Amino acid sequence: MKLKLRKIAYQLHLWLGLTSGLVVVIMAATGCILAFEEELKHIVHPNRYYVENIGRNKLSLAELTIKAEKALPEDLKVKRVLMSSNPSRTYVFRTLKMNKEAWTYWGTYLYYYRIYVDPYTGKVQEIEDAKKDFFEIVLDLHRRLLLGEKIGKTITGYSTLIFAVILLSGLVIWYPRKMSKAMLKGMFFIKTSANWKRINYDIHNVLGFYSVIPLLIISYSALIWSFEDADQWIKNTLNGNTPMEKKAKSTIPSVKFSNRENILNLIGNTMERGLKNKESALINFPRSEEATYYAELVYDERQYRNEHFNFDQYSGEVLKSQSYKNKNIGYGTALRERNYDFHTGSILGLTTRIIYFLAAIIALSLPITGFIMYLNKKKKKPKHKKNKVVFPSHH
């Protein structure tokens, strides 16, 4: 039975690896680049992220929003603002529109702009066409292979599922048939004094084992984004009898509304006050008549550690507020809110980000070392035994 399981695992590992290898290489390589995206951006574009002089007082959010919108082409409206607790940082205003039916990256983003504004003077430091940003292109390559939401996301979603099966089947193959001291050494260490074929095998086998847990967590969190039904099922199962949260809605007034500036200032002031001892604040502007201003205060680089609010877009009233410390949201919702941090490695701070970065480098090497092993075994096969299927011994 054990031998049969091993043979099935080997065949799955081999053929799934050969079919999805290229996509895995692309996703792992882009993941490596994106691991320290924010830090790299701040080094490459300091003018975008840092003000020339720190002033005494910041302008109101309404004034800054108006200045950002004046800088936008075609009378576009701001849809989001990111505020940092660091007094030397700019406010980042954003607007974008996507076409989820498009087949390419260039068609997916109809427009995508980021406006960097000095919050003390209102000076627009840079207008970025984010569609042309290197990291944005890399991110889309990572998520959709530049092939749009329908095709690209489907390919990366199923490739991630295949990769998870490859990792689990690899664990079955990695575990030796008979345990001995020599076998144990081969499982955990690379024999650097061996020939290049053995070193290649060890790199695949040993490094694959060491990276399997972070890579499975990365795969799981990616699958949650790719497959909505699985996401919903996990959330509902873990939530159990916890009541579903009701969506906050703005009350549409009977008279014409023209009080946007006051509402923006009220929300902006609330966020500024809340920013003390926090990392950043994010405000999403309403996209429909019933929608709310969704605001978030993030404690540190972990996205799930936040307080979030829904403000009525017409009255500025807080319709809903919640802290991540609130224990009544259910295990499923709590796990889902941590999904981004699980995927990026920020769940335990810099340490897990570095571990994930190293795991992504290993993931990049696995299809390459695996393909070299496959070619070596093909060369080894005697010609007169062409029809016989040989299951190689791994140890």
Image (cartoon, rainbow, N blue to C red):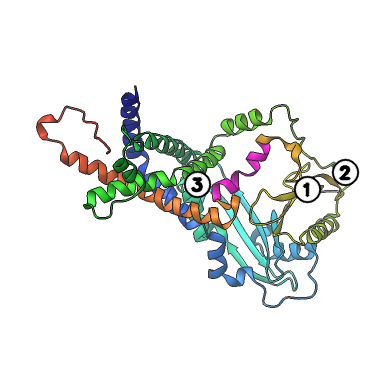
> Is 5 on the left-hand or right-hand side of 302?
left
Image marks 3 and 2: residues in contact by CB distance under 8 Å:
no
Q: Is residue 334 magenta?
A: yes
Q: Is residue 367 visible?
A: no
Mark 3 or mark 2, which is nearer to you? 3
Residue 195 rendering spot, x and y as whole percentages: 21, 52
N-terminal of the pair, mark 1 or mark 3, is 3
Answer with mark 3 or mark 2, whichever residue precedes in sequence. 3
94 or 103, nearer to the observer: 94
Quarter residue 329 falls in: top right
Q: How far is disc 1 from disc 3 in space, using C-alphas?
A: 29 Å
Q: Which picture quadrant has residue 5?
A: top left
- Find disc 2 in the rendering and name its residue: 253
Q: Residue furthest left?
A: 384
Which of 325 and 244 lies nearest the eye of the viewer? 325
| Disc 3 to disc 2, C-alpha distance | 40 Å
Q: Earlier in the sequence, mark 2 or mark 1?
A: 2
Q: Position of residue 24 (x, y in %)?
A: 40, 45
Q: Which residues are magenta?
A: 333-344
The amino acid type found where label 1 is placed reads Phe
Mark pair 2, 1: CA separation: 21 Å
Q: Amino acid at mark 3?
A: Arg
Q: Which residue is mark 1?
A: 309
> SS of the residue at dot 3?
helix
Q: What secondary structure is marked by label 1?
A: strand
Q: Is the magenta region chiefly helix, strand or loop? A: helix
The residue tagged 3 is 143
